[in-house]
């Protein structure tokens, strides 16, 4: 058997029926739990008698997420030493004042100094700092194209598409299904209504970073018994302005933030 290096490697071994008999909502969520050691693959009733029941010896688990992110953050801070914030400020869609680069994230000012320290009037999370520093260090200067594409259409996005759907689009869909008015109120606080680009029932454009906008679009169920649908789209220039891992982290962070706000007011 090949080495198991990601939840997707576990997912490939599963029946993909989403039967929920394991206690998880989907086979992908179960695969993620198995990869993290929370679940055993034998807890899937449909895997009984399979040759793939003993996969622990094949699993190459990453370091803890918090430790991984901290290491990434420290490496990015080292790289910031070679960045001239005054020179790149305008190109990034920000401003340079008193030795700091100021960039708006979801409408709020975030300040970055030459050592990579990020401050703001609101709480600063890792899901903001890592993508923000990546954006500052590696941004290629592409202007927005006006052409909206799905996550899977971005460079290397197809590989992460199943997890992106599970962690980003599906939770938004569930929020909309629980309370559509609250969902739209929440999205409208951070975004502006989009023109009728994909004939969706609702669409808002948000700016997690100045040159990496996202569009959240909602389609109501066409017939009784059918599910609503929420999709996240990106300006095609996003793939030149930020790496796919940081794009994924940004969206996951935004959705987690929305879920917390929704839980308080729902």
Image: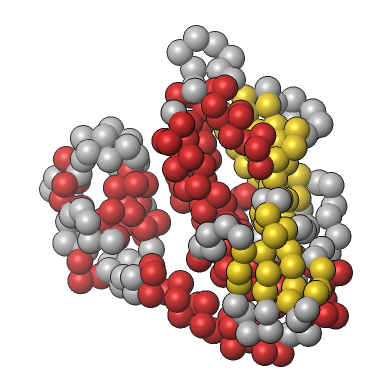
Residue 260 spot, x, y in % from top left: 44, 43
Q: Residue at x 46, y 31 (%)?
A: 265
Residue 9 spot, x, y in % from top left: 37, 59
Taking 139 as reference, is 5 left or right?
left
Taking 153 as reference, is 50 left or right?
left
Question: Can residue 193 be seen in the rendering of this structure?
Answer: yes
- Most foreground residue, 142 or 187: 187
Taking 2 as reference, is 56 left or right?
left
Q: Residue at x 33, y 43 (%)?
A: 27
When asked about the image quadrant of residue 48, the answer is top left
- Most foreground residue, 201 or 14: 201
When asked about the image quadrant of residue 83, the answer is bottom right
Q: Residue at x 68, y 69 (%)?
A: 111
Q: Quadrant of the C terminus?
A: top left
Residue 23 spot, x, y in % from top left: 22, 38
Residue 263 position (above or below residue 213)? above
When asked about the image quadrant of residue 122, the answer is bottom right
Question: Can residue 14 be seen in the rendering of this structure?
Answer: no
């Amino acid at each position: 058997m090949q080495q198991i290096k990601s939840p997707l490697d576990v997912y490939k071994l599963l029946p993909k029926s989403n039967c929920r008999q394991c206690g998880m909502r989907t086979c992908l969520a179960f695969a993620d739990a198995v990869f993290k050691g929370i679940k055993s693959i034998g807890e899937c009733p449909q895997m009984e008698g399979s040759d793939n029941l003993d996969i622990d010896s094949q699993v190459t688990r990453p370091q803890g997420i918090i430790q991984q992110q901290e290491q990434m953050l420290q490496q990015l801070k080292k790289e910031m030493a070679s960045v001239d914030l005054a020179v790149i400020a305008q190109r990034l869609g920000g401003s340079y004042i008193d030795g700091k680069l100021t960039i708006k994230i979801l409408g709020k000012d975030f300040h970055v100094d030459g050592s990579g320290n990020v401050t703001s009037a609101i709480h600063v999370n890792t899901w903001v700092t890592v993508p923000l520093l990546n954006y500052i260090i590696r941004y290629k200067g592409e202007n927005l194209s006006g052409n909206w594409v799905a996550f899977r259409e971005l460079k290397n996005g197809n590989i992460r598409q199943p997890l992106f759907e599970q962690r980003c689009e599906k939770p938004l869909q569930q929020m909309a299904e629980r309370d559509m008015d609250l969902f739209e109120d929440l999205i409208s606080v951070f975004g502006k209504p989009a023109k009728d680009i994909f004939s969706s029932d609702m669409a808002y454009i948000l700016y997690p970073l100045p040159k990496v906008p996202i569009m959240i679009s909602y389609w109501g169920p066409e017939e009784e018994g059918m599910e609503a649908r929420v999709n996240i789209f990106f300006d095609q220039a996003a793939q030149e302005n930020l790496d796919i891992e940081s794009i994924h982290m940004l969206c996951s962070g935004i959705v987690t933030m929305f879920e917390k706000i929704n839980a308080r007011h729902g």
